[in-house]
Image: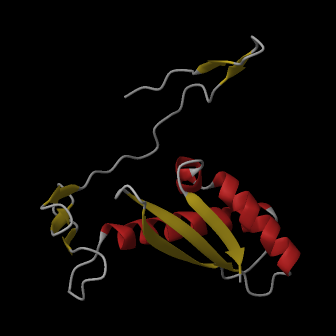
Amino acid sequence: MSYREIVVTLEVGQKKKGRGSMKKQYETAMINRGGRVGEVEAPNGSFHLKIDKPGLHSEGTNPEQLFAAGYASCFNGAVQHMLKEHNIESESEVKARVSLYQHEDGSYQIGVILEVSLPGVEKAEAEKIAEEAHDFCPYSRATRGNIDVEVQVV
């Protein structure tokens, strides 16, 4: 798969360049069978989980938990990158709280609250780090404008 430069024509007739070409750094795949009551696994067999609907008390997980795990991990990686950029030492921790909402028309949407903990870092500096991480994180970039994401320094 290759990415081409995106050119957006603005109302005033100016052109704004998009990201340009990107070099793929990593790709992964997962296979689901059974939808929300089924299983998910890596094609090579290295990962396998039972999937259940949210709210069921079972041995399985659900898509919202998996999204929360991925977002918390990715965002914390971005936080750690920003800490390094600013020469700040802290044992960062990120909790991603993912909520599932139902619209009046019956469709669903998720919302996310990211709780960032940076022990030993002053609140103003921690908020700056969290904001920069939000701009940098691939999950934040992918969800921007699509779902509500709130970043809180705790």
Residue drawn at (69%, 53%) of the image? 135
Q: Estimate the x, y position of residue 33 in percent, counting from the top left.
A: 12, 59
Indicate whether 36 appears above or below 15. Answer: below
Residue 79 located left or right of residue 55:
right
Q: Quadrant of residue 30?
A: bottom left
Work out whether residue 22 or residue 132 is closer to the camera in this orientation and state it: 132
Q: Quadrant of the N terminus?
A: top left
Residue drawn at (67%, 22%) of the image? 17
Residue 5 located left or right of residue 102:
right
Q: Decide if residue 87 is in sight here.
A: no
Q: Quadrant of the C terminus?
A: bottom right
Residue 74 located left or right of residue 132:
left
Work out whether residue 19 or residue 24 is closer to the camera in this orientation and state it: 19
Residue 27 located left or right of residue 89:
left
Q: Estimate the x, y position of residue 51 in percent, counting from the top left.
A: 21, 72
Residue drawn at (54%, 67%) of the image? 112
Q: Quadrant of residue 86?
A: bottom right
Q: Decide if residue 64 is in sight here.
A: yes
